[in-house]
Amino acid sequence: MSSPTRRIAARAPRAAVATTLTFLALTLGARAGMAETFAYVGNADSNDISVFKLAENGEMTPVQTAAFTGVEKPGSSTPLAITPDHRVLIAGVRSQPFQAVSFSIDQKTGQLSHIGNGPLADSMANIATDRGGKVLFSASYGGNKVAVNPLGANGVVAAPTQVIPTGLNAHAFLPSPDNRFVFATNLGSDQVLSFAFEPTTGALTPSDPPVYKVPEKSGPRHFVFHPNGKFVYLLHELNGDVAAFNYEAKSGAWDEIQRTTALPEGFTGKPWAADIHITPDGRFLYASERTTNTIAAYKVDAATGKLTTIGSVPTEKQPRGFNIDPSGRYLAAVGELSDGMTVYAIDQSSGALAKLKSYPTGKKPNWVEFLSLP
């Protein structure tokens, strides 16, 4: 009677160990195959980039501070862009001589290595590559112009092939989802310029119509396309408006369908809105406002593109830049006057933001880019 009991007792631990080992192997195998996610923060006054690794639970670990080689003076901000192949990060320098600093991105560690510097046409407030990674678009707030620079095979920016005068204060200059059009906001002239883009040559020509007007003294600043390509959302710096537009991909036309605000309820001061981003699944939209140091959240109607306000949360002081990680689970905002970054969890049902933790960055952080590797 006793020996079967002993045999069962002896087998049970071995079975439990085997089960545990199988579970660990599967778990570790899954984790080994998972993409690693990194955050890159552009710091204007320290002329460098803070690199963080994002954990599954939203925890950030600093992994590198990458200095700008060949740059002596700080600029007013540090716009960043990552090439579509995820191999090169480019930083715009807004001190003379105006240039773009290119870094290679280590595909395992996310760390940056300086490749080289190339010339920019002016002090550029915003940079972005086209969808094919062939050229760099840039917009000059003080120079009232936009420009196109070819990107070399090594990711270094070549001399501009087109420099186009605009209305006052060009601020954002971004391609359409299908890479057929490029749009430039003119904050001081209350308009959005539209260009047809030829990806093979990198050439821009004015669209028809070439200009979309927005309300006077609203200050159109940054915009973002919905992932489905049917809507575009435009943030206005001077009145805090967030406008939603239907986007017609064939013609590149914008048709306004809604206008709401990024300002907290009851605010009566002078607006100073900054940045706008949408989750990868297109369900939630966020906008930052610098006077109130807040981030506003909205739910996006997938059918109509219209917005429903969720509410605002306090954030870093003077939140000029923020971004959302590729999983759509976390938002990281930086404060120009706090030299810090706060990470929030995005509630996947409501879109509400819940503060997780704050981290020190370099001096005067103003831009955040996320990247998942490989």
Image (tube, grey):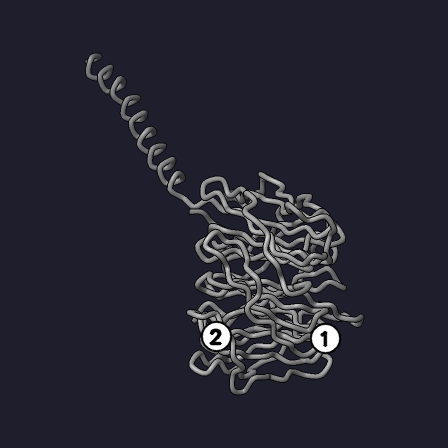
User: In the rendered image, which residue does mark 1 sit on?
Assistant: 239
Residue nearest the viewer, comparing 233 with 76: 76
Q: Residue at x 65, y 50 (%)?
A: 342
Q: Residue at x 27, y 25 (%)?
A: 15
Visible residue check, residue 113: yes
Q: Classify mark 2: residues with Cα within 10 Å, few (<14), some (14-19) or many (20+).
A: many
Q: Are marks 2 and 1 in contact (CB under 8 Å)?
A: no
- Where does the image place residue 273, in percent across and percent down from the top left? 70, 67
- Where does the image place residue 147, in percent across and percent down from the top left? 59, 69
Give the amino acid at mark 1. Answer: Asn
Q: Earlier in the sequence, mark 2 or mark 1?
A: 2
Visible residue check, residue 322: no
3D distance between C-alphas at marks 2 and 1:
31 Å
- Where does the image place residue 167, in percent across and percent down from the top left? 67, 79
User: In the rendered image, which residue does mark 2 sit on?
Assistant: 197
Q: Residue at x 24, y 14 (%)?
A: 6
> Which secondary structure, mark 2?
strand
Give the amino acid at mark 2. Answer: Phe
Residue at the extreme bottom of the image, as rendered: 209
Residue nearest the viewer, comparing 43 with 287: 43
Image vertical order of residue 351 relative to residue 242, above or below: above
Image vertical order of residue 196 relative to residue 20, above or below: below
Quarter in which the N terminus is drawn: top left
Residue nearest the viewer, comparing 313 with 128: 128
Q: Quadrant location of residue 63?
A: top right
Residue at the extreme right of the image, as rendered: 269
> Which secondary structure, mark 1?
loop
